[in-house]
Image: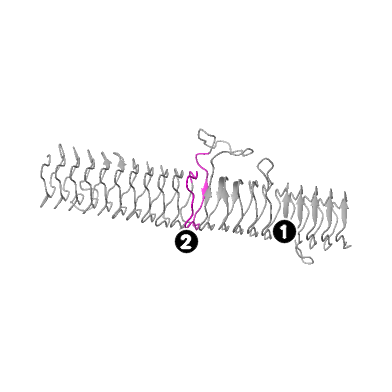
Amino acid sequence: MAVFNFNEQSLVGDIFNGQNLNGSTFFKASLTDVQFVGTKLRGTDFRESNWLNVDASNAIFAPNNNFGPSDLSLATLTNVNFSGANLKEANLFKVSTNGINLSNANLTDAILGEANLSGEQSERPNFQGVNLTRADLSLANLKAADLKGATLVDANLNGASLEATIIQDVNARGADFRNTNFTDIFLFDVNFNLANFEGVSISDVNSSLPEGVVLPPGTPVDGFGLPTDFNLRFRSADLSNFIADDANLAGSNFRSLPGEAPTQLDGASFAGANLTDSNFRDVFAENIFLEGANLTGADLRGADLSGANLKGANLTGANLTGVELDNADLTGATLNGARFDNANLTGATLKEASGDNLTDFTGTNLSGANLEVGSFVGSTFDDALLTGANISKANFTDASFSDGADAGTIGADLTGVNFVDGIAVNANFENALLVNADLSKANFTGANLTGADLTGAITVDTIF
């Protein structure tokens, strides 16, 4: 096997297809219209070389027992075809590209730190099906890249730019996205399980369907042609202080993986985000910011949302069974059909919130909570704990505060509540505790107070 030295030479139109050039050197060489189709280029030195209109499809740059990986660091690659090439462990540090095609290439463990792999949306860099497992893409520029079907398992994208990229049918399990620029991107059917998004801010996510994106047959879409479920998985990922305000992340799964650490969402912000039908079960999300978010049909069972901001959030049909929402702010939230049974809302604010006859607070701890001016017509509070709660001016018409399915015979505990000017027309307080409650000017017309304990209750101008 001959080893060739093309250092600093100018090669135009040379054809090396299928040849064995392992160990050869092209340091600072100029390669124009050159062909390396299926060429063996193990251990080849392409440092600082300049490529123009080069076809290196299916070429082999990966190491073997005799040769190490190829070195393309600081190379300039214009209109280069690497489709199907094996670039495993290759060094592409600080390469500069324009019109790159890496479709179905293997870049496992490759070094692409500070590489400029960017393009424009009108002519996207082709990364379809590329394997970037454990690749180093730190500080790399991937603007407008098409990453459909790519593999980014355990890849390092710390500080990378993913502006205007298409990330569809991608496995990015365990990838590091810290300090990454996620702007104007399309995400669909992506595995982000165990990935690190700590402190990452994303914007303009899934706001439109990019040209060239084809959704799987039968995918439900909305009036804008966007999926109603983006099938994004963030299970056991670190999303601490993650910011996704106004993002469209409908159908996302944040539920912790069995045997893995809980999904971290503490301090994250999803203000105004679309999170319909998303799964937040058992996540750790203290002080999460969900003001104005759409959580219709979301599953938040067992989640720790202590101190969460859910002002104006839409929780229609959401399941919050056993959720921790102590000191959370649900001011003005829509709770129609939401389930809070056995949840902890100690000290929570539900001022001006609204529920309906399907809203369920059975066994919920609402002690010290503020439900002032709320509307909970027909809602269920059986066996709930509302000691010291402020429910003044709230509307509980047809609501139930009676004994539920537990083993006891006592209904809801409203000891010491402030129900001044409240409405409880036709409500059910059978066996409820209203000890020392302030019921002044409240309207209990038609209410069932059989067995209720009103010891010490204030009933000035109360209507029974």
Locate residue 63, reporting x and y percent.
Answer: 75, 63
- Residue 261: assigned label: 2
**Mark 2 neighbour class, 10 Å CA radius: few under 14, some 14 to 19, many 20 or more:** some
Name the kind of residue labelled 1 in the image: Leu
Name the foreground residue: 46 vs 320.
46
Q: Which residues are magenta?
A: 227-251
Is 105 covered by the magenta stretch?
no
Which residue in the protein does label 1 denote?
Answer: 92
Residue at image coords 27%, 40%:
375
- Residue 68, quarter of the rendered image: bottom right
Locate residue 239, reporting x and y percent.
Answer: 49, 56
- Residue 313, quarter of the rendered image: top left
Name the foreground residue: 134 vs 96.
96
Quadrant that contains the C terminus? top left
Farthest bottom residue in view: 66
Task: Describe the element under mark 1 as helix, strand or loop.
Answer: loop
> Which numbered disc, 2 or 1, marks the residue closer to the eye?
1
